[in-house]
Image (cartoon, rainbow, N blue to C red):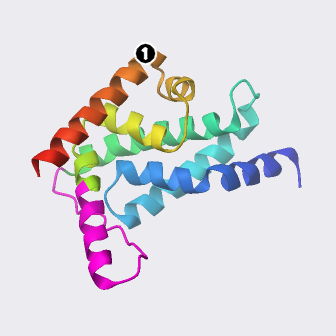
Amino acid sequence: MDARDRLFQQAMADCGAGVSRVAGSYVRNTAERDDLVQEIWLAVWRALPSFRGEASLKTFVFRIAHNRSVTELARRRAAHTGTEELETIEDDAPGPEQRLQDQRDSERLVRAVQQLPLGLRQTLTLRLEGLSYAEISEVMGISESNVAVRLNRARERLSARLAGE
């Protein structure tokens, strides 16, 4: 196994679930998310020879995921302007009443996050993936103070939206 293979395996192990969640924040159903995840990992594989270690591998992968997702979102918006279905989030909590309540809460949150403007949604998703303000700044190409502003605005809008429902 060469260095590229090892880096790719490490990236998939460290960032696999996060890349899937990031992709899911850009599209609204599991089939589209799965397609986008495959495109992201292909882009990561192709970009690995240019990885020089100036940023962490995690930041490198999330930057590619972000850029690929934005490109895909723009392509899909141009292709069709119809309504998209909301992805249903499954919950393994015991008891049917608790599962139903958890599902309703999750759907409310997903709807609220999906209604955020793209810039706020992107910033919030990356922060939820555990990226620092500096890493988000690098991934999105904005200042750290702009990251903080976007996160505060996203939280305010989510709180207001969820309180209003």
Q: Residue at x 29, y 54 (%)?
A: 110
Indicate left or right for 56 with 141 as reference: right
Mark 1, Cα crowd under 10 Å, few <14 / some 14-19 / many 20+, is few
Q: Residue at x 63, y 35 (%)?
A: 60
Residue 29 in which image quadrant: bottom left
Indicate left or right for 94 with 99 as reference: right
SS category of the residue bearing label 1: helix
> Is 54 one of the magenta-colored residues?
no
**Residue 77 position in % (x across, y down):** 25, 45
**Relative vertical location of residue 100 with respect to residue 28 in this rendering, above or below:** below
Question: How many numbered circles are shown?
Answer: 1
**Residue 154 position in % (x across, y down):** 29, 34
Q: Quadrant of the N terminus?
A: bottom right
**Residue 11 position in % (x across, y down):** 69, 48
> Is 96 one of the magenta-colored residues?
yes
**Residue 89 position in % (x across, y down):** 35, 67
Which residue appears farthest toward the left when viewing the image?
A: 164
Indicate left or right for 93 with 86 as reference: right
Q: Residue at x 17, y 50 (%)?
A: 81
Report the residue marked by disc 1: 145
Amino acid type for the residue under numbered disc 1: Ser
In the image, 3 versus 11, the foreground residue is 11
